[in-house]
Amino acid sequence: MLGIETSCDETAAAVVETVDDDERPWRLRSSVVASQVEIHREWGGVVPELASRQHVRDICGVVERALDEAHIAWPQVDAMAVTQGPGLIGSLLVGVSFAKVSAWALQKPLVAVNHLAGHIESLWLEHGRIPTPSVVLVVSGGHTSLYVVPAEGEYRAIGRTRDDAAGEAYDKVAKLLGLGYPGGPIIDRLARDTNQTAVRFPSTRLTHPDRNAPRREYRFDFSFSGLKTAVLRHVRQRQKELGTGQLPPAEISEIAASFQATVVDTLVERAFAAAKWHNARSVGFAGGVSANSRLRSVAAARGRAAELAVFFPSPHLSTDNAAMIAAAGLRQLAAGRLAPPDLNAEAALAL
Ligand code: KG4
Ligand code: ZN
């Protein structure tokens, strides 16, 4: 399976094959990611039009390299999978057009993949069989969405952010602290060996508006925009007190670490509460923010305490990649769900 991913600012292609192993049926042959982060850094965030133009420049080379590294040529590709959405429409269109044309020219089956299903399947690609039902949190720059996976390949949404995604909050807080872009890895690094409780920031807990909601409808939603504002207020207040726009580096690290502690505690608390509510046998974290070292250690400790298996993808499969799209594509291909010839990209595709 050749997977193609262009939903945001990474042009990616990967080859995943099925092997005769019931516990680990998918094997990663190659995964190539061309990141545009250097282009967007200058602007402090992803500029959609620049992203789509760069995808056009990169896509052929990225796909050729993925085939090369898998030691195959086009005739050995049995099927193709492409991200249909959600994402930036101009970016998505590059991958969808490329995949449709190649699949048609080669007369190979094409499957359309939801980017979020890809993030979820990154866990199965990495670890093989994961105990179900599982609760999986997809947490990235664009999403903070919680799912129950009752059985492999089935996804049921049970919560999401009502405003900013967790990764977006990381990026915005890093920007206001003058730390650079993307903020997640920078704050992750700064927060190590730093006091996590120097500043008390508020955390938000959202549930169903009706406290006696039917069991199936209980929500596990998130909100991060209030936290972002609290950090901004705190920084302004300290600047006023110190009479300078530039806070001492040690204090910036403490603010970053305290922000991160609040985000991580919220994510872990909600994910494990959902796991308990849904009698899950495992908890998974996927998406760019799942690369976070504190999230990994806090979730692992919580898993041990709750006697629940906890799964993370390796860092390479956490951030956007096409291997997870190929894996999710194999799932769909096995179920016989092929993309129609008039497949179109969908910016707000739901899962
Ligand atoms: O999944 P991803 O590559 O793209 C989206 O689909 O959004 O996630 C990118 C996001 C960015 O917001 C970035 O700051 C965040 O993931 N991120 C991290 C870390 N590495 C990347 N956040 C916290 N800690 C990290 N180590
Ligand atoms: Zn993503």
Image (tube, grey):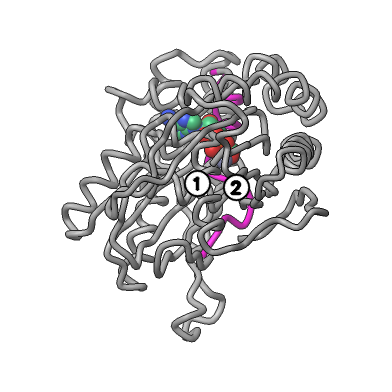
Say if 32 sits above or below 248 in the image: below
Q: Quadrant of the N terminus?
A: top right
Say if 225 sits above or below 307 in the image: above
Label 1 CB, ligand 2: below 8 Å? yes
Say if 64 sits above or below 99 in the image: above
Q: Residue at x 75, y 21 (%)?
A: 54
Q: Secondary structure at mark 1?
A: helix
Q: Residue at x 57, y 43 (%)?
A: 78
Do the numbered discs 1 and 2 sit on residues whose CB atoms are within 8 Å? yes
Q: Nearer the viewer, residue 314 or 211?
A: 314
Q: Position of residue 14 (x, y in %)?
A: 53, 32
Which amino acid is tagged 1? His
Label 2 CB, ligand 2: below 8 Å? yes
Rendering quarter of residue 197: top left
Q: Quadrant of the C terminus?
A: bottom right
Mark 2 nearby-residue class (10 Å; few <14, some 14–19, many ≥20): many
Span colored in magenta: 159-179
Residue 163 in magenta stretch: yes
Q: Position of residue 242 (x, y in %)?
A: 52, 17
- Distance, label 1 to label 2, CA atoms, is 7 Å
Q: Position of residue 18 (x, y in %)?
A: 41, 46
Residue 4 in magenta stretch: no
Left or right of 155, for residue 103 = right
Q: Nearer the viewer, residue 303 or 227?
A: 303
Q: Position of residue 159 (x, y in %)?
A: 52, 63
Q: Nearer the viewer, residue 306 or 60?
A: 60
The residue that disc 2 covers is: 115
The residue that disc 1 covers is: 119
